[in-house]
């Protein structure tokens, strides 16, 4: 018989996503401070200017910086600046661009087609990219023009600097622009222990979408153009797409909190450490297999059906969209060791029951 504590529903969405967490204290404090007095609108405020400068410092690059409400807009608009409607964008078969943006990149580019390259643990490889570019050179095939790399990947893995250098070099050799989907860029930086600019230079990134929401902002992502020519009309794209915030300071001031004292990196390291703790516990659990190397803040595992059922009953929240029996547990800046250990406890106790049948 299940005891009362066993059936109690746990609050919150725990491991469903890193965007189920609230805003981190540093971002929230900066948000509240930015509320004082009046400020110029549409990005002409002092917060926006300062944050753009801070981001240029962080990346040690003279890039153009813009702020939008979410990652789908950041990716769709960034990719569109690199493309004509008859171009194509190469991304992995599991890329957010392909699976989770409702055709946004195609829509905003006015017809550019996504070409899907095979991936291993969410990572692209040079051979599959090259194959998509060289298989056709006729005018009936949408001309490959952009390579989109997700760092860290949708499968919670992180490209090494060497892997990025190979992809970046191949892209330039093949005449492709490089877009980086960095919805979880912070987690990749923490995982590699590299300077943010080193990742950009290794992959020869032209435009980066730097995720803010998943690392602790209330809302918003930054778009950084390392090839500034691409940014020429970007402000118009943002405005037309409904992505120009009138009270821009509320999008940008929280970045100040996140960037001060490297709070973003502290939070990214914490999320990664929670995932590592969970992965270590799971790999020592009979009947449970890790599906991808847990390089960043996500853990993918296969669990027996009975374990899923029991976790469900006990109120645990996580995604199971990646196939029968598999689970994605996502950790954030707000995940606690107590939550990880309680989840592990519940998985272990149900896995053991299962194993003893
Ligand atoms: C979350 C995420 C995004 C952004 O998604 P929005 O919901 O539009 O903010 C983009 N790319 C990846 C890989 C993501 O995980």
Image (tube, grey):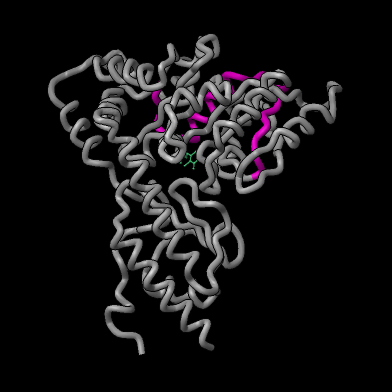
Instruction: Quadrant for residue 264, please give it.
Output: top left
Asked if residue 71 shows in the view, the reply is yes
- Front-most of residues 6 and 151: 151
Residue 69 is left or right of residue 299, and the answer is left
Quadrant holding the C terminus: bottom right
Q: Is residue 62 magenta?
A: no
Q: Residue at x 61, y 61 (%)?
A: 323
Instruction: Quadrant for residue 27, please give it.
Output: top left
Q: Residue furthest left?
A: 37
Residue 347 is left or right of residue 203, and the answer is left
Residue 135 in the image: x percent, y percent?
84, 30
Residue 15 in the image: x percent, y percent?
40, 57
Q: Find the magenta span and give its range.
A: 66-93
Count of residue discs: 0
Residue 337 in the image: x percent, y percent?
30, 58
Q: Residue at x 73, y 25 (%)?
A: 144
Quadrant holding the N terminus: bottom left
Asked if residue 42 shows in the view, the reply is no
Q: Residue at x 22, y 32 (%)?
A: 31
Residue 23 is left or right of residue 131, and the answer is left
Q: Is residue 78 magenta?
A: yes
**In this rendering, is residue 98 above or below 230?**
below
Q: Residue at x 47, y 80 (%)?
A: 352
Residue 320 in the image: x percent, y percent?
53, 61
Instruction: Quadrant for residue 302, please give it.
Output: bottom right
């Amino acid at each position: 018989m299940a005891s009362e504590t066993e059936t109690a529903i746990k609050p919150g969405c725990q491991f469903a996503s890193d965007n189920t967490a609230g805003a981190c204290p540093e971002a929230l404090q900066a948000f509240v401070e930015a509320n004082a007095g009046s400020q110029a609108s549409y990005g002409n405020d002092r917060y926006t200017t300062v944050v753009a400068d801070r981001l240029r410092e962080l990346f040690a690059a003279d890039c153009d910086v813009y702020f939008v409400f979410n990652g789908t807009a950041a990716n769709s608009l960034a990719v569109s600046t690199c493309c004509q409607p008859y171009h194509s964008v190469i991304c992995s078969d599991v890329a957010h661009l392909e699976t989770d943006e409702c055709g946004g990149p195609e829509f905003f580019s006015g017809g550019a087609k996504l070409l899907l390259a095979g991936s291993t643990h969410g990572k692209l490889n040079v051979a599959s990219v090259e194959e998509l570019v060289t298989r056709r050179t006729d005018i009936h095939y949408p001309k490959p023009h952009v390579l989109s790399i997700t760092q860290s990947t949708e499968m919670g893995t992180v490209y090494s600097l060497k892997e990025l250098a190979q992809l970046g070099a191949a892209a330039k050799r093949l005449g492709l622009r490089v877009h980086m989907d960095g919805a979880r860029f912070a987690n990749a930086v923490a995982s590699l222990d590299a300077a943010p600019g080193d990742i950009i230079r290794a992959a020869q990134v032209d435009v980066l979408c730097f995720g803010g929401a998943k690392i602790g902002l209330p809302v918003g992502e930054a778009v950084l153009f390392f090839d500034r020519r691409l940014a020429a009309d970007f402000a118009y794209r943002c405005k037309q797409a409904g992505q120009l915030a009138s009270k821009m300071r509320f999008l940008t001031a929280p970045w100040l909190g996140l960037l001060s004292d490297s709070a973003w990196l502290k939070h990214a390291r914490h999320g990664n450490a929670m995932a590592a703790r969970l992965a270590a516990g799971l790999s020592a659990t009979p009947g449970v297999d890790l599906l991808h190397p847990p390089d960043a803040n996500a853990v993918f595992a296969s669990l027996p059906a009975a374990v899923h059922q029991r976790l469900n009953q006990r109120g645990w929240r996580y995604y199971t969209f990646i196939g029968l029996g598999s689970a994605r547990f996502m950790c954030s800046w707000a995940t606690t060791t107590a939550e990880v250990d309680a989840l592990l406890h519940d998985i272990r106790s149900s896995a053991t029951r299962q194993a003893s049948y």
